[in-house]
Amino acid sequence: MAVYYVATNGNSANAGTIDAPWADITDANGRVSPGDTVYIRGGTYNNSSRPALSVGTASGAPVFFRRYRNEQVFITARDDYDASEFTATPEPNIWAKEIGRPDPLVNDNECGVWYNNKTLAEQEALDKVNTNGFFYSSGVEFLYINVGDAVEPSGTVSVSFYSAIRFSGCGNVFFERLIFAYSFKGLGRMSLLGDSAHTGSTTLEACVFYRIAQNGVQPMERNWVFDQCLFYEHGSIDALTFTNNYAYCVYTGSDSRPSTFKGNIFFRSALRGYQLHLYPSGPLSGGHVVEDNTSIGNDTGSAFVIADDNGGNTIRGNTVIGRRYSSLQQAVFFGAVIRKTGNKIYNNRFVRLNGWIIQHSTPGLVNDYRGNKVWNCPAYTYSQGSTSTYDVTKWQMTAPIASLFFTHNGSTVNPGGTNAKVHRSAWSAQAPFMLFEDMQDDEPTEQSALNEHLAKYPDCGWFTLFPNHPAARVDIASYSPLLKTVNY
């Protein structure tokens, strides 16, 4: 199996060796075979022309894309814009040995870039660039300022954003330990995009998706696997500066084949939007697996949304923790109009969520719920239920707030088990089929959930995530000692 290399100082006409690397991963088109490996050298790759990656076959060994050793790789979507719309210089690159910054929370007028305790660029020189537009990597000593942040929060600018990588006619492709990053705070789009010619499956293992606004990752068409990835401030727009009309971390488009989302972390992501929106509406939809994902530090919106014609989806072993009751409105939400049956929701944990834990928009459906646990969720827990199975199942809850109850809005319910016992919860005549019990289990915290997750999926913690990044309001590394420190 052959090995090839890509580097920022490469050339598309090169042979792809370590001494003569290619310039972009799309240079692999027509040059690699199943089983080959493409190593990506450290640096930032701005794919402004929306190149299409077309490699591999529908079956057999995948083509592997891996970062080279411990070098840090950024793959970002540069925006397409009319330069006259902005007053700042488009995307200046500043190289320095050491970069610090004043605290903007102390003085908003001190948002310049500092180098060795001296002003390298005052705020006036950067015009309206906000501190949240900085990417900082200690290893490659590279500060990237995206011109998109030159737009004032109150401004309205029409900007089109493209994909960092677009797939066209790809076969089995494997991406490992890459960082997809984008700094624009406003109206970004997706970082990954498939199309109808994308065959086979694509696996993203231990990748980081950082601050990609709006529909961050849109795995449209065919099979996708997200394994032990981190979505950090992803699909998010700062609620203090921009209005976010339901952004997504991951959005599956029409005609998607079954995809798998396993062992991923959603951290401070999908503000006022959806962390994972499964919306396949074509003949190939259904059968998604959402397993062992951890959602913490997220404010508003929904965790997992299923709007699927064919059903048959499985959500199991996930932990969703909200923030002080003003958090996720729905933890699991089954679409708006589309009919869905045969979904299985097993052994999930829902903590401090203010809204529907499980909501059906269409009554009369057959779904199966087992072994789920709920702590301190002050609103509806199960809404607009269906003809569902509760075989030998106990919903375990702690509910100091008396408004916790189940509703099924008149649907027929087959209990299949024990009559209701209600403890520390408001009993409702609408829910005679449910069993409420006091739990012996301790309520999961963000820290304990993250520790537990990383103990089971250690590859999720290979990175040190921008500890000096101004946008990192909470350093995720402080949440768990299991997050590894990598010296790039």
Image (spheres, rainbow, N blue to C red):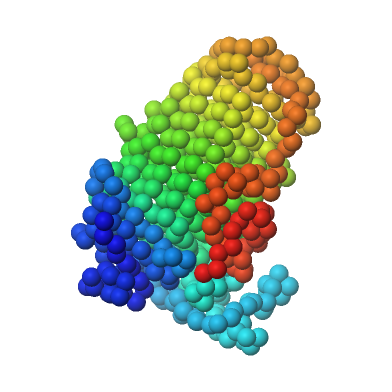
Which residue corresponds to the image point at 69% horizontal and 18% vertical from the top-left? 435
49 lies left or right of 88? left
Work out which residue is located at the far front of the displayed protein and give it. Answer: 1
465 lies left or right of 376? left
Q: Is residue 453 above or below residue 356?
A: below
Image location (x, y in percent) of residue 124: 58, 83
Image location (x, y in percent) of residue 338: 43, 29
Which residue corresponds to the image point at 41% horizontal and 31% vertical from the top-left? 287
Q: How many marks?
A: 0
Image location (x, y in percent) of residue 484: 59, 58
Residue 140 visible, this angle: yes
188 lies left or right of 269? left
Q: Is residue 106 above or below residue 376?
A: below
Which residue corresponds to the image point at 77% horizontal and 32% vertical from the top-left? 401
Q: Is residue 400 above or below residue 254?
A: above
Residue 170 visible, this angle: no
Q: Nearer the viewer, residue 163 or 210?
A: 210
Tell me the quarter of the picture where residue 129 sits.
bottom right
Image location (x, y in percent) of residue 159: 42, 64
Work out which residue is located at the far bottom of the displayed protein and give it. Answer: 118
Which residue corresponds to the image point at 39% horizontal and 69% vertical from the top-left? 41
Q: On the rendered image, what quadrant is the N terminus found in?
A: bottom left
Q: Nearer the viewer, residue 473 or 378?
A: 473
Q: Is residue 409 above or below residue 468?
A: above
